[in-house]
Image (spheres, rainbow, N blue to C red):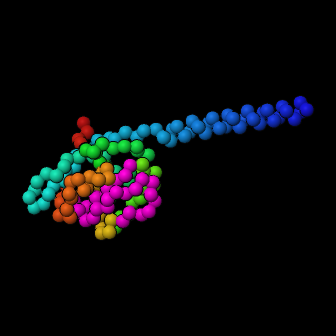
Amino acid sequence: MKKILRPLAWCVLVLSLTQCGDKKQDVNLTRTIDFKKEGELTLTRVPTDSLIVTLDIEIAEDDYATQTGLMYRTSMKEDQAMLFIFEKESPLSFHMKNTAIPLDLIFFDQDLRIVNVLRDAKPYDQTPLYSGKPAKYVLEVNAGLVAKWKLLPIDQAAFSRLTTD
């Protein structure tokens, strides 16, 4: 009987240690990713040149940042946004995989004029979200802000980067 119980107890111990290790990994995957202000962006009403809003922006322009975007974030303040910058103007596609925040996506051409807006993208939805027209920049903001700001197709953006000393 001892020959059977000893290996069984050993297996139970190994399995319980393995499960504890998995829980530690889960904790690391759910750590909070903080917003990193890297610049400011203004949206302006054309032709009156009146300011609609000024936002703090985090910039995504390398492969990792553009593929990750706002994934794994649990919230974003109303005056914050993520600006994606691509090398050239082309049709773009986004998805909400691993994104917990409902978003509005604003697509801009190379001159930072709005070419399309997608409202209320649903968290975790993997359905492709297409720009509809070639775009070079994409601004992700909290869902509902495009309606609140009453953005129009003629509105335009400008942004500046923070200087690093």
Instruction: Residue at the far left: name it.
Output: 48
Q: Seen in the image, is 157 located left or right of residue 24?
A: left
Q: Name the spot of residue 129 as percent of width and height, x first.
A: 38, 63
Work out whether 54 lies above or below 133: above
**Horizontal side, residue 54 vs residue 91: left or right:** left
Image quarter hosting the C terminus: top left
Q: Is residue 114 covered in magenta?
A: yes
- The residue lying at 81 percent from left, 35 percent from top is 8
- Residue beneath the point at 11% across and 54% down: 50
Q: Position of residue 62 (x, y in %)?
A: 37, 52
How far across and down, in percent of the image, does residue 47 sit? 10, 61
* Magenta residue check for 151: no
Residue at x 23% of width, y 46% of height: 55
Specify the segment rendered in magenta: 101-130
Image side of residue 37 versus residue 111, left or right = right
Q: Is residue 81 above or below residue 22?
A: below
Q: Quadrant of the N terminus?
A: top right
> Does residue 33 show up?
yes
- Give the residue furthest to the bottom: 133
Q: Residue at x 34, y 51 (%)?
A: 60
User: How many numbered marks have been drawn onto this rendered protein structure?
Assistant: 0
Asked if residue 88 shows in the view, the reply is no
Q: Quadrant of residue 134?
A: bottom left
The part of the image, by quadrant, that contains residue 109 is bottom left
Q: Position of residue 138 (x, y in %)?
A: 30, 57
Nearest to the observer: residue 24 or residue 159: 24
Residue 21 figure quarter: top right
